[in-house]
Amino acid sequence: MLILDCPCCGRAADETELEGGGEAHLTRFGPGASDDDFERYLFLRGNPKGVHFERWRHAYGCGKWFLAARCTTTLEVFGTYAAQTTAPPPEIVAAIKARRPNWEAPV
Amino acid sequence: MPEARMAWNGAAFDGLAQVRELPVQGMISLRGDLASAPVQNAATEVTGAAMPGPRGVEGAGDSAIAWMSPDELLILLPHGTVQDALARMDAVLAGEHALALDMSDARAVFEVEGPAAREVLAKLCPVDLDPAVFGPGEMRRTRAAQIAVAFWQSGPHAFRLICFRSVAGYLFDLLKGAAHPAARVGVFDPSA
Ligand SMILES: [Zn+2]
């Protein structure tokens, strides 16, 4: 069972209080974009085995969106942070590197 | 205005804990910047309660303020006073980017009381109900089985739960099952 600390309300939220929102830090491509960019934005996801950045909503709690860094194989949670970011913040990257020294942040 | 009717006719059940539907509770949803003075004043002036911090609930009985999210408060008032309170709040909130709305008829309220009340809730909600972790003064929004609820501790062995009116019967049946005399676990129950 996954438990994430909601950074918006400060509650430890059980998975059953949350709704998953898929991969985080996507770059949006809209009108005027190339077909390839639009396809990548709309359909193509990393789906990594290991460190993953995700969007979650505290649906049964405060109702707010936030982001989480976790490992898809072990369910280890490296941290949660505000949804209003375009890349993982330094403290999250540091927490991941402390546990996965060979991991490199995606560019 | 037609007379306010309870969602589940004041249903009651006596088991490991006493479960009962409470009379219609006045509720105003207040959304806005919780750091702004007019928003805080609108909440505190009509309830006489202090402004709660994150996750908190302040006040007593049916006049209270609960922190629901970083931009939302729930104002609890006696049902008959909601319209007057809304008018007063709108005056305090003039010019402020905020919303105060009467939500009383959208909700139902139940009370679970007795030494095993904690255990009844713990069976239904993904919440750590250890008295050292969850106590008076805290508002908890979560789920009970398949529906959204919010609850707080209203007495030494009593909790009040709010749910949507349309699922009041479902919540009552859940509470009844969790409070069934044959279903005692005894984890939080000092009398067990
Ligand atoms: Zn939350």
Image (tube, grey):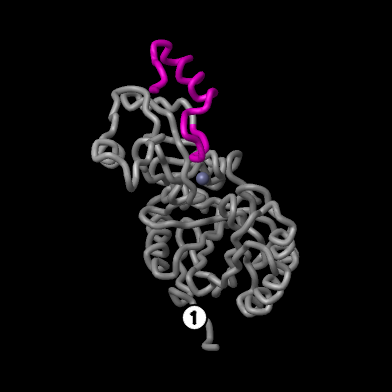
Circle 1 crowding by C-alpha within 10 Å: few under 14, some 14–19, many from 20: few
Q: Nearer the viewer, residue A36 or A100?
A: A36
Magenta stretch? A80-107
Q: Position of residue B134 (x, y in %)?
A: 58, 44
- Secondary element at tag 1: loop
The amino acid on which the numbered mark 1 sits, given as a three-letter code, is: Arg
Looking at the picture, how far across and down is residue B43, in whole percent? 69, 63
- The answer to which of B142 and A56 lies nearer the viewer is A56
Residue at image point 66% right, 54% down: B34
Q: Quadrant of residue A19?
A: top left
User: Which residue is painted at 43% across and 27% down in the image?
Assistant: A77
The chain under label 1 reads B
User: Looking at the image, which is closer to me, B173 or B18?
Assistant: B173
Q: Position of residue A36 (x, y in %)?
A: 24, 36
Is residue A30 located in the magenta-colored stretch of the structure?
no
Residue A28, position as x, y percentages in the image? 37, 41
Name the residue: 32% across, 45% down.
A32
Quadrant where the image shows the N terminus of chain B: bottom right
Q: Is mark 1 within 8 Å of ligand 1?
A: no
- Depicted B47 relative to depicted B139: above or below: below
Specify whether B76 is left or right of B167: right
**Residue, far top:** A102
State yes or no: residue A91 in magenta.
Answer: yes
| Image position of B186 with respect to B22: above or below | above
Residue that protrudes farthest toward the bottom in the picture? B1
Numbered-mark total: 1
Q: Pointer 1: what residue?
A: B5
**Residue positioned 44% across, 33% down in the render:** A68
